[in-house]
Image (cartoon, rainbow, N blue to C red):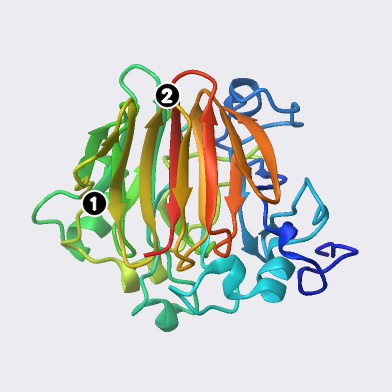
Amino acid sequence: MPLTSPLPYHLAMKTHLYPYLLTPVYKNYIWGGTSIPSRFNRKPQPGLCAESWELCDHADGMSIVRNGPLEGTSLHDLSLDMGSDMVGTAQQTDKFPILVKIIDAAQKLSVQVHPNDETAPLVGGEAKSEMWYILDGAPGAQFYAGLVAGTTAATFDAALEDGTVQNLLKPHPAAPGALAYIRGGCVHAIGEGCLILEVQQNSNTTYRVYDWGRVDAEGNPRELHVEKARQVIDWELDAAGATPSEPIVDGPNRTQDLLVTPYFRFGRLNIESSCQVTNDGRSFHMLFVANGTLTVSCEGGEETISAGTTCLLPAALAEYTLAPDGPCEVLRVSLV
């Protein structure tokens, strides 16, 4: 059950606008590894650590503020209490509109598909379009997005039957800094050796169509959802790559939008000196430090965060300062 702060935002002063740090929610799926705790200097987790949900307001995972006056408050309660001061005015929503996670694929993920806004009601699921930013990849690591030209429901079914689905998937090299936009309806899979930051609609609906013959510790295969998948697959939909904007250069600092979708905006900040950021109130800013160490400060407080740390800045925070300790790569998520 989500925890509630002893001092709700609506009873507090604006000093409750500060950089929120969130407690990760870990998932120990069968294909996961151990890179997330070890790479980002986090507390070791029991068993596998396939995913770390960094920003989530969902029945399957809830972010809790772990610092400052609002420590112990769930993201859900905070969004309800603060309203547009938290989420922003760009989108009206009953729950936080996006979910952000780190994925460590020690093994291949299943071949899968998610519904889009139009098909989700047909199958009783949640719409899910997502993007992947490759944080790191083992030599030769790949991800798969989209189907080869000419693939039909019939040829796909035949490949499922004889175990040759991989031949129908489009492979892409998983080089650090690569990005893919996986829209609902696009068949996809993440290959082994990929460490990914994923930004998605707030959904946990996945339809597995093929799992590489994998079985669990008891020798049982995981459940497949082929019938529902058939209803949501777009047979001609390919993964859309990034179309970066021109970078904004300010001395040694560079800011660049890498992907803008109807659901979120994703950008990268490469900064070497202190800079001030303004916000017009239309969206929260979520920062993920990919490399380096950074101090985020504003009138309500400051936090120094290292690589692998997620920081949430509410939409009503009109300005904040980023002060890097040397070169720093920061990934920023907001609403459009």
- Badge 2: few (under 14), some or many (20 or more) residues near its Cα, within 10 Å? many
Coordinates of residue 189 in the picture (x, y in percent):
37, 44
Instruction: Tell which residue pokes out farthest to the bottom in this image.
Output: 122
Residue beneath label 1, please? 239
What residue is rendered at 50% in x and 54% in y?
Answer: 285
Tell me: residue 189, above or below residue 129: above
Instruction: Tell which residue pokes out farthest to the right in this image.
Output: 6
The amino acid type found where label 2 is placed reads Glu
The amino acid type found where label 1 is placed reads Ala
Residue toward you, 78 or 175: 78
Labels 2, 1: front one: 2
Coordinates of residue 222 in the picture (x, y in percent):
55, 50
Residue 171 visible in the shown view:
yes
| Image-based side of 316 in relation to 8, left or right | left
Look at the image and tell me in which quarter the N terminus lies: bottom right
Coordinates of residue 197 in the picture (x, y in percent):
46, 40
Residue beneath label 2, please? 272
What residue is rendered at 59% in x and 39% in y?
Answer: 296
